Each structure stands twice: as structure tokens, then as C-alpha cells.
Image: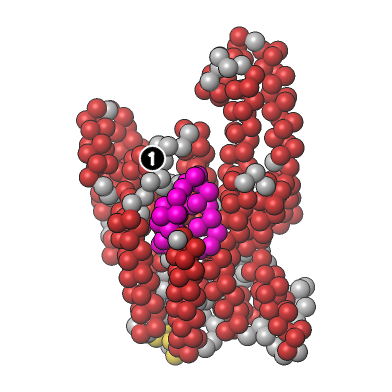
Amino acid sequence: MHLVVLAAVASAVLLSSVLVSLTVHHAQPTPYMDEIFHVPQAQNYCAYNVSHWDPMITTPPGLYLMSVLFLLPFRLVTNTEVCTLFALRCCNIVLTLGNFYVSSLIAIKLAGAAGSKVRAKLVLSSAAMSLLPVLHFFTFLYYTDPGSVLFLQLMYLYSLFDRHYLAACFGAVAVLYRQTSVVWVFMVAACKALEIAESVFSASDNKHEGLSCAVAAIASAPMKQARLFAHIAKRVLSECAGYVVVGLSFVAFVLVNGGIVLGDKSSHQACAHLPQLGYFALFTLVHAAPYLLQPGILKRFCESVLQRPFFYAAVTLACLLAVQNFTYVHPYLLADNRHFPFYLWRRLLGRNELVRCCLVPFYIYAGYAMSHQLRHKKPLWQLLFFVCVAASTVPQKLLEFRYFVVPYLFFRLQLKDVKYWQVLVELVANIALNVAAMWLFLNRTFTWTGDPAVQRFMW
């Protein structure tokens, strides 16, 4: 049954994507936004001019290398130029289908032994995830998003099957798409390292319940535990060698390049933008509303606040201090009225500090609800996840919804025992948002004073 649903959804996504792509290309037959940098760079790669590099491009060449791999066979067969704008955009349709398929495999793997009906529900759930508006929109433009997400999902899938060398290879490709992908390579590697440590401690002494008693064990038998740590280190280096190579290669790149960003470094300076965690929490609360805005979770949250008022008072104070002292506004956010975050800032977040502070309770609830939905994961896994969320978002000065896509998908994939009504609400909401965003892009065009070029709204 789930295979029928998989085929039906894939066919629907393919057909709709082709139709929308044709419509987008008819309305915008020239490169738009970041495409003005990406498309010429890809065409240089297609012409084997790999020494050319546009200094305005800040991400590695994974997007262009993958496009060449996709399109080169057609060029060899037809002996014609195939790296056209439309062909380059269509590469992302293939990657989007791949995202749907791989997320289905991940969901089924995480669910364990599940019947056909449950698998069918998980396939629909994966369809809803792959239609996340901020991600799906870039199926129709030549951007890095679908590719970086696909290779991160492939990395995660193969890690679940303990194929860690292949997983590391996919992680390396993801880093070639976007530098921040290295954070999620680290997470997968750290999860495996924790799993190894847990198994070694459990096997060494059944009296110790894994890592939770490791400190006590070390104090009672330091020599024994020293040998255990040496054994753990040996196994980690053996089984996680691929991830280590990716990590060391990335460090070498940063040292040689003089920073993480390629090209124009002046516009991408790292900072401690702590409210990004709140923005991500709100982003997750909106897109995962069927799973997070449940009466039961709201009730437990209120009970938790009443039971631990001093804890929540301290958290609220810390959040308010972060909002007041660590809010940054990137010049791009204020200058570019083509992006939806521009209007979010102008009409809500940027009105005054009081408005931003009033959102703190929503941030706290979203964080509680996310933690509640991850309660089936081990505490160390949860801690590791939130650390990686912080590492991938907090250094970013720019408020950009695209930064939240990967951490959101990692969270969404972990949700357990989702119900049909939740999946259907999410699916319908995502389809509606996609239709609205694409309608705005195609029909609500405008021009700037002194610039006759047509401008379009986008994520």
C-alpha cells in the first residue's frame, strides 16, 4: 500500500513541479536574484572553465558540479548546449523528488517495524515535509537549497543503517553546497560516537546504566575506565573516520580561505545573534503547528510553569536580555523588499523592542513543545540537537528563513506516532502556502524607482 502512495505522491509532485517550472520560466525567462551569480558560474563549469569564480558567490561549487553531472550526458548525446537557465532550474526538480523519497525512507527506518498502513501515513508525512514552503519554493529557481537538503538527508539515512563511510561522502557533498552543512555532519558523527560509548559502557559493566553513570564509574575504577575510554576512542576513530576527514578538511579550508565564507566576506560577518533561536522556535511552531499546538501539550506547559515558576522566570529573563542586547539587523534585511522577512521585520519585529520582548513567551512555549515531542530521544541526543541548531543559526546576522530549513527538517523527522489528521493539516497548509507564495511571485510584480527591471516577492 505504501508503495502505491509513494508512486502517486511522486507522480503528483513531478507533474505539478514541471507545470509550475514552465510557468515560472515563462514569467521569468532571465536569471533572478541570486541566479544572476549562480547561472553564469554553472555555465562556466559546463564549458569546463573551472578556474573562473565570481567573487560575489559565497558558497562552494557543489551546486555547479552537480549540475554538470546531471547535464553532461545530455550534452554528449545531443552535442548541443544544455546548460540553459531552464535546464539548470529543472535539476532542482530531480533533487526535490529525491528529497521526498529519501525522507520517506528515513521516516520508515525511524519507525522500525511498521505495517503497510503506517508506512503509507509516513509517506504522506514525508510529502508534507518535502513541501515545506521555504524549501519547495526553490525547486523552481537555481538555488542551493534542494541539493544541500538532499545530501544531508542521504547522509542521515545511511548513518541510520550504519553505513558511515557512505554517509560521510554524502555529508561532504552537502558541505560543498553549503558550509553550514558541516554542523549536521558533526551531529551525525557525534550521535554515532555517543552510541559507541553507550554500548561500551553497557557491555563493560551491567551495573552501570550507560553514560549516565560514567562519572561515578571513573571515580571508582580510574584505570579500568581509562582503558574503556581508549577502547571507545579507537572505535570512534575507526567507525567515524569518514566524518573526521570531512571535519579536518573543513578546518583546513577555513584556515586557507581565512574564514568560512567564500567571496564577499564583508556581508557575512559572524555574530552572536541569540534571538535567532527564538525566530527558529517561532518558525517551527508555525510550520509544525498540528504537532506542537495540541491542548495536551498546552496543559502540560501551564502545569510546568506553575510547578517551576523560578526556572521559567529565569529563562524569561535570559530571553529578554538576549532580545535587548543581542538583536542584530543586517543591512540586507532593511534594504531588500523582495523578501518576506523584510515585511516581518518592518511590520512586527522591527517596530520596537517591546514587540520583540512580547514574543518571548511564544519562544519559550515553542521550545517546551519541541522538547516534549522529542522526549522519546535520549537527553544527550536532545542536547546535541539544540547545540547544532544554535551553531547553525546564532552566528547568522541576517534573518533568513532558509537558515531554519535543515534544523526544522531534522526536528520534524523525529516526531513519533503522528496522526493522519495532523499530517493532512500540515500537507494542506503547506500546499496553500506554496500556492500563495508562488502566486505572489508570478502576479504581484513591482519595479524600483530608477530601475525598470521587474521585481518579485519571494522567501
Residue occupying the point 77% across, 78% down: 49
Magenta residues span 100-129
Q: Quadrant of the N terminus?
A: bottom left
Residue situated furthest top in the rendering: 220
Tell me if 12 is positioned left or right of 163 in this view.
left
For residue 436, which quarter of the picture? bottom left
Between 358 and 46, which is closer to the camera in this rendering? 46
Position of residue 266 measured from the top left corner of the image (x, y, whole percent): 58, 62
The amino acid type found where label 1 is placed reads Ser
* Residue 60 on image: x %, y %: 66, 64
Query: Does residue 59 appear to the left or right of 454 in the view shown?
Result: right
* Residue positioned 70% across, 88% down in the render: 81
Q: Nearer the viewer, residue 380 or 58?
A: 380
Disc 1 target residue = 371
Tell me if residue 160 can be seen: yes
Q: Residue at x 33, y 61 (%)?
A: 424
Query: Is residue 247 inside the magenta stretch?
Result: no
Q: Quadrant of the C terminus?
A: bottom left
In the rendered picture of this protein, how many numbered marks are placed on residues? 1
